[in-house]
Amino acid sequence: DVKVTQSSRYLVKRTGEKVFLECVQDMDHENMFWYRQDPGLGLRLIYFSYDVKMKEKGDIPEGYSVSREKKERFSLILESASTNQTSMYLCASTSLKGARPGNTIYFGEGSWLTVV
Amino acid sequence: RKEVEQDPGPFNVPEGATVAFNCTYSNSASQSFFWYRQDCRKEPKLLMSVYSSGNEDGRFTAQLNRASQYISLLIRDSKLSDSATYLCVVLDGYNKLIFGAGTRLAVHP
């Protein structure tokens, strides 16, 4: 039962291309997140959104933008891909608001992007 | 200072050993806490939520100390299948999920 779906698992793009990474969740969650994960650096937050049309910068937003036009979909956009954006990108969603034991964060399976 | 810091690892332990991981967080307004497990080239999977009273799930015990802003994970009777990276995750007061860099565990026969 897949709950968070990332549209592309493996992509190879050229430097300067515009890249779209799509994430869809079917749990009616308010909060959605995009991370990238690199060896030795762990998961770093790029952007997150707590509602439709709302977005907040994470720790490393440079070179990225996002779109949340519908509650279930959160898109990550690389306007002009560069080789240092080669990474694994993870989308996550959660309904957490306040301390609610038992709630969980759901992750997509990851998108492996290589920029050449 | 990083918002969430974990033991750097790697931890190399024999089967049957008890191992403990620590995690500290800097934002006292943080609201919810989790331990996730991540296998190589896979997405993170929830291991445990961490409650103020502490909680146990089989061989795994999680503790939270809000005063010291400290979270721990104890694994008893380690199995080969426990080899993975363990991520400490904190939800801060702004609905932002923050991950520690992860602690790698390798259990050997």
Image (spheres, rainbow, N blue to C red):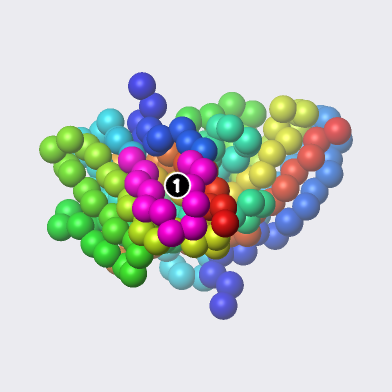
Residue furthest to the bottom in view is: A1
Give the residue displayed 48% in from the left and 36% down from the top.
B9
x and y percentages locating residue A52 in the rendered image: 45, 54
What chain is tagged by disc 1? B
Nearest the viewer among A100 and B74 is B74
x and y percentages locating residue A7 in the rendered image: 70, 60
- What kind of secondary structure does the magenta stretch mostly adopt? strand
Residue furthest to the top in view is: B1
Horizontal side of A41 relative to B64 (left or right) equals right
**Magenta stretch bounds:** B11-22
Q: Is residue A86 above or below residue A54?
A: above
Horizontal side of A2 relative to B45 (left or right) equals right
Nearest the viewer among B3 and B19 is B19
Q: Is residue A59 magenta?
A: no
x and y percentages locating residue B60 in the rendered image: 34, 61
Give the residue displayed 28% in from the left and 55% down from the top.
B62
Quadrant in the rendering for residue A102: bottom left
Q: Which residue is mark 1?
A: B87
Give the residue displayed 80% in from the left and 48% down from the top.
A11
Kind of residue at disc 1 = Leu
- Is residue B97 in sight in this rendering? no
x and y percentages locating residue B92 in the rendered image: 30, 42
- Is residue A28 in sight in this rendering? yes
Q: Is residue A4 above or below residue A61?
A: below
Q: Is residue B18 magenta?
A: yes
Helix, strand, or loop for circle 1? strand
Horizontal side of A8 relative to A72 (left or right) equals right
Quarter in which the N terminus of chain A is drawn: bottom right
